[in-house]
Amino acid sequence: MMLPDRTVASATSMAVSGAEVVREQSIDLQMSSDAVPLRVAVLGSTGSIGKNTLEVIAASEGRFKAHLLCGHRSIDVLVEQAQACRPRWVVVTDSTAAESLGPGAFPKGTELVIGPERLEELLAAPEVDRVVSAIVGAAGLRSTWSALAAGKTVALANKETLVTAGPLVTQLAARSGATIVPIDSEHSAIHQALRSGRRHELQRVVLTASGGPFRTHTKEQISEVTPEQALKHPTWSMGPKITIDSATMMNKALELIEARWLFDLRADQLGVVVHPQSIIHSFVEFIDGSVIAQIGPPDMKLPIQYALAYPERYDGPARRFDFGVAQQLELIPPDLERFPAVRLGYDVAARGGTAGVVLNAVNEEAVQAFLNGVVKFPQIAELCERAVSEHPFIGDPTLEDILRLDAWARKEVQTWMC
Ligand SMILES: NC(=O)c1ccc[n+]([C@@H]2O[C@H](COP(=O)([O-])OP(=O)(O)OC[C@H]3O[C@@H](n4cnc5c(N)ncnc54)[C@H](OP(=O)(O)O)[C@@H]3O)[C@@H](O)[C@H]2O)c1
């Protein structure tokens, strides 16, 4: 990978990941008069993570530049972002949505590119230094795959990539020399905490979960909740799909699976604890009993900046933890009866193979059906559980197997929801 002039790359100590996907490079991000920004492709720039990423880039004092923006249907947002950032490329993945673009919508020097195939080609361009993968859902798999195949450093928000194809993705990164740095706040916390010890000293990781808006609801109350209630997250502001996943706690299931593949853990090294304040972002326990946590206010700008700048740190725009204010930080074991998605997450993380892709596909379809009023809230986890147990399981799937089962699961669950 070509790095800009001011970037001093030295090699690499395998600080954090057994899967060798997180490679430590020394990169000088300090500003100097001849500083050349690292050029960032922001996939999903029109979404919640994408917008936060552009704020981090805008506040980076020239360390980073948005070189490629990619949106799907939010054309007005994309036009506004392009006017502000003046990227080299704007990619619209939905060709129908692109038809609404008038001439002169983008600034001079910005080229409009349409369709996911062209996006995949552009990600391999030498002038793309970093890729932020923040498309929602399995739709983010192909572009993330292309960036990794081209050996890029990928700041990964799209957890579905690892949930659906974790072992293949980490193997690809190892082959191409690509680096994955997580954006998910829990995985960013684990990534940071792992830097306190050596691989063979690791006991387990424990992911924190806010518990979502229904943390204290009874099972009966949970069975009647509406989309409006589920879309009100108590601590985080996020896109609609992940907000519903937080309410069902399926988000934690997906994150258990993500952590398993990203950090090359055994399933018995994974844990979850409910932490309603969302201040502690996760824990790493070492074999001597020492537990390292990473804390900060719930603000995605910090993990985004960490992933873009890794292994450097600088003074950025993220909110700060206030030690002058009294805080009560609770830790509560999750209730797997009321939130069966968490149990399913443990099962799927242990099973591997095609269980992840089927879980993810059915969850995406069921969340949409819940938002459309077609299914009730508890059915989301029930449909996922049924699909995982009934699907034609493959233990060691190819990418083709994964894509085929993704399509199969989406079709199958539609017939169950009629
Ligand atoms: N939000 C968070 O705080 C957070 C935290 C951790 C991890 N994540 C993960 O980050 C990812 C993005 O989440 P988000 O909350 O930012 O979602 P979001 O606000 O719903 O944004 C989704 C983005 O994906 C684009 N998109 C949707 N369908 C697409 C398709 N078929 N092809 C290409 N692009 C498509 C959207 O484009 P248009 O809007 O232009 O249609 C938008 O830019 C998810 O995987 C989520 O799990 C999010």
Image: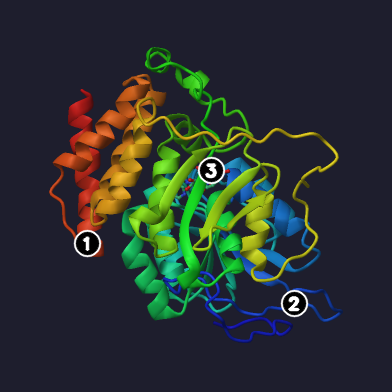
Q: Quadrant of the N terminus?
A: bottom right
Query: For this rendering, which residue is in front, 52 or 69?
Result: 52
Asked if the residue at tag 2 contacts the one at tag 1, i.e. Cβ–Cβ closer than 8 Å, the answer is no
Mark 2 surroundings: few (<14), some (14-19) or many (≥20) residues within 10 A? some
Q: Secondary structure at mark 2?
A: loop
Count up the numbered dots: 3
- The C terminus, quarter of image: top left
Task: Choose between 292 and 213: the one closer to the eye.
Answer: 292
Is 129 placed above or below 299 here? Answer: below
Left-right relation of 214 to 399: right
Ligand 1 within 8 Å of disc 2? The answer is: no
Q: Within the image, what quadrant is residue 277 found in? A: top right
Q: Residue at left 75%, top 77%? A: 36
Sequence order check, earlier mark of 3 and 2: 2
Indicate the secondary structure of the residue bearing disc 1: helix
User: Which numbered circle lies on residue 400?
Assistant: 1
Q: Which residue is mark 2?
A: 36
For the point 56% across and 81% down, the residue is 13
Dot in front, 3 or 1 = 3
Q: Which mark is residue 208?
A: 3
Question: Of callouts 3 and 1, which one flags the residue occurring earlier in the amino acid sequence?
Answer: 3
Q: Amino acid at mark 2?
A: Val
